[in-house]
Image (cartoon, rainbow, N blue to C red):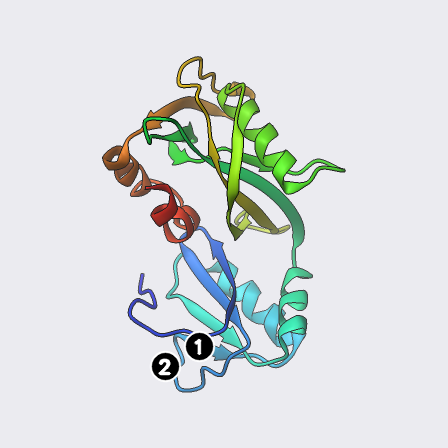
Amino acid sequence: MKALNGQTINNIEMRVFHNDKLLILNTGDFSGYPSNFALRIKTKKELARFVKGWLSLKESEDIIVFGYQQGNLLKDFISLFKFVEAAGGVVKNNDGETLFIRRWDMWDLPKGKMEKGETPEQTALREVKEETGLKEVDIVRKITETYHIYFDKPPYYLKLSHWYLMTTKQKNGLIPQIAEDITGVVWLDREQCKKAFSETYRTLRDMLEDEVC
């Protein structure tokens, strides 16, 4: 897979991941880029046709989509999916270790869907506690937001995840939430964290690795 490494990209508005593929929605003018990196799209019909084809690809070069007014581009893109919001945490202990979960034979970070009436902060705290067994966790600040598409055939879901940096004094008593297919909860030091990130989802690798490790 070829990425846009080393390229200067301005006005990035939204990065969306599907498996290991990356789609960048942007309002800038990328007509000077090679056609395999940047695609001009002017209407929702064109956008829908492109997205359908892109989702069916097993792998792809990273692609920038640009061409019409920002609000419409993002709104039209989101309207093509079932939209879901979630929140999770990058949890650190007093030893500087980071909390990881093991789910579906992949390293991951604790997160889950927002329930009706919840704020993203409330969701993040609840999900971290439920998935890991931690009793007391504090939010330090918001880190970022990530978008990813899941399911490999229709209906496709677009998930917006809110990520928060958290701290806890608790190190023991971790309990994986088996009902959510979590088979392990562990603290990893910096080197272990870097290794885990080589075995996790590209969404996390691209958007959170610097913050986490």
Outermost residue to the left = 191
For label 1, the SS is strand
Residue 180 visible, this angle: no
Left or right of 6? Residue 146 is right
The residue under label 2 is which amino acid type? Pro
Instruction: State the separation of the CA atoms marked 2 and 1.
Output: 6 Å
Residue lying at 52% horizontally and 72% vertically, measured from the top left: 26
Outermost residue to the top = 173
Q: Where is residue 136 in the image (x, y as percent from the top left)?
A: 53, 22
For label 2, the SS is loop
Residue assigned mark 2: 34
User: Is mark 2 in CB contact (under 8 Å) with mark 1?
Assistant: yes
Looking at the image, residue 76 lies above or below residue 167:
below
Q: Position of residue 203 (x, y in %)?
A: 43, 50
Residue assigned mark 1: 38
Image quadrant holding the N terminus, namely bottom left
Left or right of 66? Residue 38 is left
Q: Position of residue 83 (x, y in %)?
A: 66, 51
The residue under label 1 is which amino acid type? Ala
Residue lying at 52% horizontally and 27% vertically, measured from the top left: 137
Q: Quadrant of residue 68?
A: bottom right
Figure disc tally: 2
Residue lying at 63% horizontally and 65% vertically, measured from the top left: 77
Q: Position of residue 107 (x, y in %)?
A: 38, 34
Pick the front one: 199 or 130: 130
Residue 184 visible, this angle: yes
Image quadrant holding the C terminus, namely top left
Looking at the image, residue 104 lies above or below residue 149:
above
Looking at the image, residue 40 lies above or below residue 73:
below
Identify the mark at residue 90; answer none if there is no mark. Answer: none
